[in-house]
Every structure is written in structure tokens, then in C-alpha cells.
Amino acid sequence: MTEHTKTDGLPDVDSSTLPQAFGHARPRTERMSGDKVECNACPVLCQISDGRCGACDRYANHGGVLVRVDPVVVLRRALAQEDASLVPFAGRSRGELAAPDAEPRTGTSGEPVTDADVDDAVTPAWNGDLLRAEDVFVTGVGSSTTYPDYKPAPFIVSSKVRDVDMVTVVTEGIFSYCSFKVKIDTDRFLGAEQANVRCKGEVVGHVTTAEYGSQMLSLGGVHHLTGGSKKEGRITAEVMRELGNRQAVELTIDGGAQLVIEAGKAPIVNGVQEQRMRVGCGSAAVGIFAQQFAGLADEVVVVDDHITGVLTEHQAGRCLDMPRSGIQMRGRKSTPGRYFQVANPGTGWGGTDIADPLSIIEGWDEGVARPGLRLLMTSTTGEHASWYVLDDALRPVEQTMPTEVRAIVERIGANCEPSLCTVLFLGGAGGSLRAGVTENPVLLTRAIKQALVNVTCGGAPAYVWPGGGITVMVDVARMPANSFGTVPTPAIVAPIEFSMRLADYQALGGHMDYVRDLGEVLHSGAWHNDGAPVSLQWAPGGGVNPWPLVNGPQLG
């Protein structure tokens, strides 16, 4: 029988009992070649020959030294794009930057990094003037990791902001417990709720639900990364990395649509690029434009997969004293003028499977309807619209739409926002990652919940979920380019930073012996040489993001 013990959290740890040696592990076997370096930046433990990269393409053996091949990205406010140069850290020899047979290195934007790039960047764009320290922020992108989690974060940076001593703990987290939530602005039917989402035949996520004008997907997650086959995990990690790095991904949904999605771009559904996010459901559209339709049409039906609106039955029509038209709709009547399930979901009118809007009309009440009655049928985006007049047999006959009515339909379309894909990274920053911040990880969690610590990912604001642990969510479009990587375990690598007052950092048991001022960090890089980046790259900061050092956490 399992016995559960209720506690008030972990006790304080006596730092004097902790190991203080942060060197490289001894070779596991004597058969290991002497010129190889065992990378211990993730559990795979690649044996890397001189001049070669590990399986993740993020770490390499340069002359017997394990290095992080990408530069660490440093944000600076008011930085012009042309100033975003690559700057090698001083204190590292020229030979360590590029071994003769080294694999090509790439920068954060994916371009190869050559010796010429390094030579061109010998003169830093920033001269070490600490008076501008408030405008500089070291991100976790390219910073290296704390794995195997017994050592402090690679960058623990102190600076003075508004005369307050601050510190930022910077690392690259390895996330297995993480996923992407994707919002796709479209009325088209993408797939049934809980339907599998596949990439290259492997299940990488599922459909969750529909929001207002959007369809939601959940992609990745620990069960796909580690709970399925090796191929499923590998492809899931690839999809997550590409989505996080704002690249296009092709997906299929079981029993549903084929998709191409990319953060910040319009989705492509079954080969057709989506254009508009609907102005509202059918009922909302009826209400919004009711007054404009009054006097120009005797009946208006806004076709919608979820709630189809009928103007003369709707409360808006009643308030405008519009007489009932006698129209009889298919589907399930919810409330006056609001109908559910008029058709099946699809890629036709208003997210239904219909191409002929008249198919959702059951008939007309002969005691109410009359010949000559004017009927407009439109979709929620105005992309589909037809104009009818009832003949003597009360049959709708399509006619040319009057100019005034056409203008209102076009206004419905003009009120629709551009259709986009929004990609949010959602990850749990576990105990191992927190150990890089403090000797007593639970104190970091508590400090965040007390709003003493701001959490950012690549300098972008991260929303911290309520409840236990540190579960953060961030819009990948607000992060630096190519912020995400993978390790073959498989898992996602993402940047994360914790900013706080220096006094608070000391109080939560921070690694005070590894705090270094910003000038020293920009001069010589990480505090260690084992798997550290050899250069930094400036990038513009701020913009749509609040500056991390002067902003509080976004707590749920």
C-alpha cells in the first residue's frame, strides 16, 4: 500500500554538502578513442570526433573541446538590423572557433557561419559601456544547457536596472513535457474533435475544439514524444521544432482536411489558402447587420455550421419590427432565429458541407410567405452569398443581387480579420531545469508565484499557468528566429530566462558564486568551457515585447 505524506515543501539544503566540481565525466570505457569528446548536454551522450557535430547538430568537438555551435543571442533595444553582427567571445583561442575538418556551423537564422563571418565581427557592435546595460538582455537561445542538471545555468548575469541590482539566469531547457497549441483561423471543417493529426503517417497530435472563428489543434506532448514508437517520437519532435521556428508543416487529419500551417501565415486547407476569419457566428452576423438589412431584404439567412441565423425570427429582427417571412429551416432550433446542425461540417458555405444554400430550407409557411419576398443567403465571411425572390409557387428564384445589398455583404467580408495560424509553445519547466537556478528548486517556483521572478523565453513574455510547477506558454512569433532545437531522446530544446532582483536571487538559494556582471559575460561568454557557445549574436529587442528586466511575470 502506498503511503502519502503531506509536507510544506522541501527543506533548505546545506550548500556545503553539494559537489562543487563541474568537470566532464570520465570516459565510460577504455575503448573510447582519445580524440573523441563525449557530449553530456543531453542523455544521448554522443561520442563526437574532432571537427564533427553530435546527433543534434548543436554541439561539436572543436580541437578536443566541446562547444555549442550556435551563438548565444543577446537582445539590445534600439538595435538596427544591420548591427546584428556575430561577435566571438574573447578569452577563447582562434583555433577553437573552427577546427580544420569541422562540420559547417550555422547561425540562429540558419545561414552558415564561416571564419570570414567571425573575422568580420571582431569589433563588437557594443563596446562594453555598462551605462547601456539596461538595454542589453542575454537570452537562452544558443546559451547551452544545464544537463545533467547538477551544475548552475551557463549564464547567470547581473546588471543594474534603474539603480536596482538585477540578475538573469539563462539556459536552454530540454523539454519532454511540452506541446504546441495551434489556433487556425478558419470556418472550414478540419476534423472531428479528438481526431488524430498526422505528419508523414505518424500521429503527432489531435484536434481539440473550435473557438470563435478558429479551429484548435494540440501537437506534440510527452505521450507522442516518448510514449509511442521511435519513429513517432522523432517525427513529433521534428514537427514541433519546425513549428516553433516558424516553418511550414504539412499535416493530415484522420477523416478531415489536409493542412499546411505556419506561425503568422494563413493556413492552407485542402490546397486552398484561407483568407478570412469570420466576423461572428450566424446569429452574431444577423444582429450586427440587422439594421442595415432592414428595408432592403425581407429575410436574411446567415449560414453557419454552428449557429445559423434567421433575421425575421431573431430578436434583432423583432426589435426592428420586421414581419415574419414564413421560412422553415432544417436543423435543430435553439432559440428564436438561431438554428444548430442545419448541415454537416465541411468546407462549403459557413463551414458546412453544402454547396447549395437552399438545401437547408425545409419549406415556406403558405399562410405567411408571399410571392415577391426578397431573400438573402450569405455565409459568415461573406465569401458565399446569393439573392433570391419567391415566385408565385413560393419557390426561391436566384436573381442579380441589388447593389445596396451587395455592399452590405462586402462589409461583412471587410469586417473579417485576416486568417492566420497562431502557434503557442506550452512547456513544463521541471525540477531538473530549476536546479540550474537554485540549490533548492521549490523556492524558485514559489518566488515566481509571488511575482518576484519574471519568466521569459528568448526574451518573449511567458504566461505562467496557475497551479503547481512552472508551466509556461509563449507565442513563438514573439521569440527570436530559430529559438527551438531538438535532442534525439527525443525532446525539444527551448530558451528560458528567469529575471529577478539580486537580493531575491540570493534569498532563494541561487548560485551566487556563478553570478557575473554583464560586461564579463559579453567579454568571455559562459562561466564554463564544456559545451559553451563561442560567440554571441546581437538581435533587436523590445518592439512588441515588454523589456524583460523591467516587467513583471504574467501569472495565471
Image (cartoon, grey):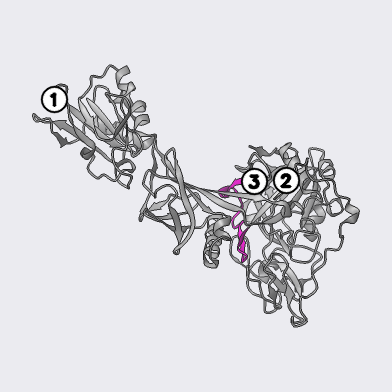
Q: Earlier in the sequence, mark 3 or mark 1?
A: 1
Q: Amino acid at mark 1?
A: Glu
- Check whether the beta carbons of the residues at disc 3 and disc 1 lie within 8 A of each other: no
- Say few, some or many: other residues with alpha carbon within 10 Å of mark 1 (under 14 / 14 to 19 / 20 or more): few
Quadrant of res 393:
top left
Q: Which mark is residue 366?
A: 1
Tell me which residue sits at (61%, 43%) in the image: 543
Residue 555, percent across and down? 66, 37
Visible residue check, residue 129: no
Residue 198, percent across and down? 45, 59
Residue holding disc 3: 471
- Say few, some or many: other residues with alpha carbon within 10 Å of mark 2 (under 14 / 14 to 19 / 20 or more): few
Tell me which residue sits at (79%, 38%) in the image: 162
Image height check: is 160 above or below 173? above
Q: Is residue 371 left or right of residue 472?
A: left
Mark 3 and mark 1: Cα distance apart in space: 61 Å
Q: Secondary structure at mark 2?
A: loop
Q: Amino acid at mark 2?
A: His
User: Which is more foreground, mark 2 or mark 1?
Assistant: 2
Residue holding disc 2: 4
Q: Is residue 339 left or right of residue 202?
A: left
Residue range highlighted in magenta: 472-492
- Say few, some or many: other residues with alpha carbon within 10 Å of mark 3 (under 14 / 14 to 19 / 20 or more): some
Q: Amino acid at mark 3?
A: Thr
Residue 303, percent across and down? 30, 36
The front one of 142 and 149 is 149
Q: Secondary structure at mark 3?
A: strand
Q: Earlier in the sequence, mark 3 or mark 2?
A: 2
The front one of 523 and 197 is 197
